[in-house]
Structure formats: C-alpha cells, structure tokens
Image (cartoon, rainbow, N blue to C red):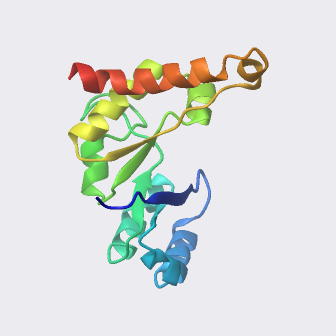
C-alpha cells in the first residue's frame, strides 16, 4: 500500500497577470521540494493563465487546477466555463464550493454537488471546499454544517 500524500498548494484567486504566472512557473519548475514523494503540490491560477501554467508545469509533479466551473458541458451560461473546456486546457483538478463563491455568488451545496459529479465525469479531481461561519461555531453547529456540505457534494455521485 502506498503512503498517503499531503496536498500542498495555493489558489491565486484574482491575482497574478499572465506574465507574473509565467515567472512563478519558471521559478518553481526545478524546486527540489517538488520531488518529495510525501507531497502533491498544486497551483490554481486565474482562468486567464490556466492553460499556460498547465503547459509550463507539465513536466513537473505540480497539478494545475481551475478556481471554478459550471456543471454543464455547454450552453447559455454567460461567464462560465465547462468541464470539457478545462480538460482541453490540460488541468488536473478544480476547486469547488469556495466560501467566496457561496457568499458572493449564492452557490449552494446542491450546486457544488452537481459540479462535483461533472468534474468526476470528465476526469477532473474535485477539490471540494467546506467551511462554517463564526455563528455556526458559537452555536456548536460547526460539525453539522461541515458534514452537510460534504454529504451534499457527494450525493450526486452516489445517485449517479
């Protein structure tokens, strides 16, 4: 049985221009820590850089992800990106359900579940984000909230 790997990485959010992303890739490309078998490094750049980052890091163990995606393969979803589009960019994983998506864009647990199922259907690794609010902690409901988010993200997989 192989040892469990620790995933270590970063989401760049709405930071780094394409030129800055390219410079970052060039800087980390030969880092010795990338060869540590205990680690699975990853980066999640903004959409404008995802294809180039994936290309530049293709020969390294660094996995490249996207910050979000829609569950539909195509359609009238202005401003969204589909799983096939991400696969075509050469990425490995996709961040789903981030608290900022939930708070600012109204993303629900059910939506995260649909996205999770779509990611898996297209061979992408879903990096599912869960989290509670301070009020949930104070009320002693943090575990309940987190468990509900995990169940909702995985429910479409069990059904499918």
* Identity of the residue drawn at 36% across and 34% down: 70
Report whether 120 appears left or right of 133.
left
Q: Nearer the viewer, residue 147 or 59?
A: 147
- What x and y, as percent, mark residue 150? 46, 27
Q: Report if residue 107 is visible in the image.
A: no
Image point (74%, 23%), residue name: 137
Residue 21 visible to the viewer: yes
25 to 140, vertically: above or below:
below
Would residue 135 be found to the left or right of residue 144 on screen?
right
Q: Is residue 121 left or right of residue 127?
A: left
Decide if residue 160 is on the left or right side of residue 151: left
Locate the N terminus by quadrant: bottom left
**In which image quadrant can residue 98 be found?**
top right
- Give the quarter of the image for residue 53: bottom left
x, y percent for residue 15:
62, 57
Q: Residue at x 60, y 52 (%)?
A: 14
Which residue is more in the foreground, 52 or 146?
146
Q: Which quadrant holds the C terminus?
A: top left
Say if 72 sits above or below 61 in the image. above
Q: Nearer the viewer, residue 53 or 95?
A: 95
Give the image location of residue 96, x and y in percent.
Answer: 46, 37
Q: Residue furthest front?
A: 1
Indicate the position of residue 84 as horizontal and vertical percent values.
24, 45
Look at 43% across and 28% down and name the residue there: 112
The one nearer the camera, 45 or 123, is: 123
């Amino acid at each position: 049985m192989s040892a469990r790997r620790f995933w270590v990485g970063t989401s760049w959010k709405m930071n780094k221009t394409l030129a800055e992303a390219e410079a970052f890739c060039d800087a980390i490309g030969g880092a010795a820590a990338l060869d540590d078998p205990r680690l699975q490094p990853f980066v999640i750049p903004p959409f404008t850089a995802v294809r180039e980052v994936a290309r530049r890091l293709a020969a390294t163990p660094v996995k490249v992800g996207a910050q979000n995606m829609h569950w539909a393969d195509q359609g009238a979803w202005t401003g969204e990106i589909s799983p096939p589009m991400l696969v075509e960019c050469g990425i490995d994983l996709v961040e789903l359900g981030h608290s900022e998506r939930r708070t600012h864009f109204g993303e629900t647990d059910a939506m995260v579940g649909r996205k999770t199922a779509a990611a898996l259907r297209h061979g992408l690794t879903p990096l599912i984000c869960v989290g509670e609010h301070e009020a949930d902690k104070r009320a002693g409901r943090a575990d309940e909230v987190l468990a509900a988010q995990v169940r909702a993200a995985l429910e479409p997989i069990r059904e499918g």
